[in-house]
Image: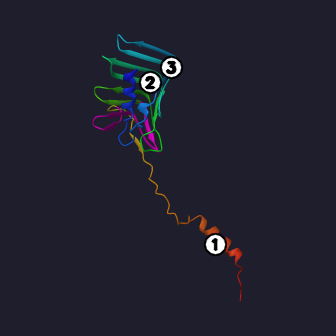
Amino acid sequence: MRNFIVWLALIGGMAPGLVAALSTDRNQPMYVEADRADIDDKRGVSVYRGNVKITQGTLQLTAAELTVHSKNGDIVKAIAVGQPATYRQRPDGKEKDVEAEALRMEYFAHAQKITLLDKAEVRQAGDTFRSDEIHYDIAKDVVNAGGSAGTPGDRVRITIQPKTKPAAKDATPAAEAPATEAKDAKTKPEVEQ
């Protein structure tokens, strides 16, 4: 179980510039729910099946099945599958959560890589990153997206929302200006000469 906490902490680095998990999350208790849990310490394999839900602080992971492989107490690989498997976490200093989903999410500890496969999507504050495959190299902070060569119709789709700047405090919105003029016109009678 402790190895899985490492996986969840590292998966928080899923997309460069998007995710830096709340630093307080790793100090929170972790809650695991599933319809079934099969833990084989001798083989180093733990399988959680049926409505799997993991929460720790702001982190939430859901899947139909989660398989964690470990060796000598260290996580080697973790695979979450679902319709879709989902991930959500609040990054430090951000007001919006990062959300990710895919039919399959894979984490490879030694290679320090995360792969989202089949209908993969990452979202934050209206920005989206979609592809059939999204590969993230944690150590290099590099994202590669796109399907296998020759896969028809698989294109990377990225939506970046414009950054809005706060309006000046003294500025009157344009929509209010005509209403103010109309009000003034009614209170000051016009005199014809």
Spatial distance from mark 2 to mark 1, Cα to Cα? 61 Å
- Decide if residue 177 is on the left or right side of residue 112: right
Q: Residue at x 39, y 41 (%)?
A: 18
- State the quadrant of the N terminus: top left
Q: Which numbered disc, 1 or 3, marks the residue that appears first in the sequence?
A: 3
Q: Does residue 115 appear in the picture of this structure? A: yes
Q: Residue furthest bottom?
A: 193
133 in the magenta segment: yes
Classify mark 3: helix, strand or loop: loop
Q: Which numbered disc covers residue 181?
A: 1
Residue type highlighted by circle 3? Ala
- Residue 121 falls in image quadrant: top left
Residue that label 2 marks: 81
* Secondary structure found at label 2: strand
User: Residue sitting at 37 percent across and 12 percent down?
Assistant: 41
Label 1 Cα neighbours within 10 Å, binned few <14 / some 14-19 / many ≥20: few
Compared to residue 96, the image places residue 2 above or below, namely above
Helix, strand or loop at disc 1? Answer: helix
Residue on which disc 3 sits:
34
Residue 52, position in %: x, y? Answer: 49, 22
- Which residue is nearer to you in this view: 29 or 175? 29
Residue range corresponding to the magenta coloring? 118-147
Mark 3 crowdedness (10 Å alpha carbons): few <14, some 14-19, many ≥20: some
Whole-percent x and y of residue 131? 40, 36
Whether pointer 2 and pointer 1 mark residues with C-beta atoms closer than 8 Å, the reply is: no
User: Badge 2 local density, few (<14 within 10 Å), some, or many (20+)?
Assistant: many
For marks 2 and 3, give the CA distance.
Answer: 13 Å
**Residue 114 in the image: x percent, y percent?**
35, 30
Residue type, label 1: Glu
C-alpha gap between disc 1 and disc 3: 63 Å
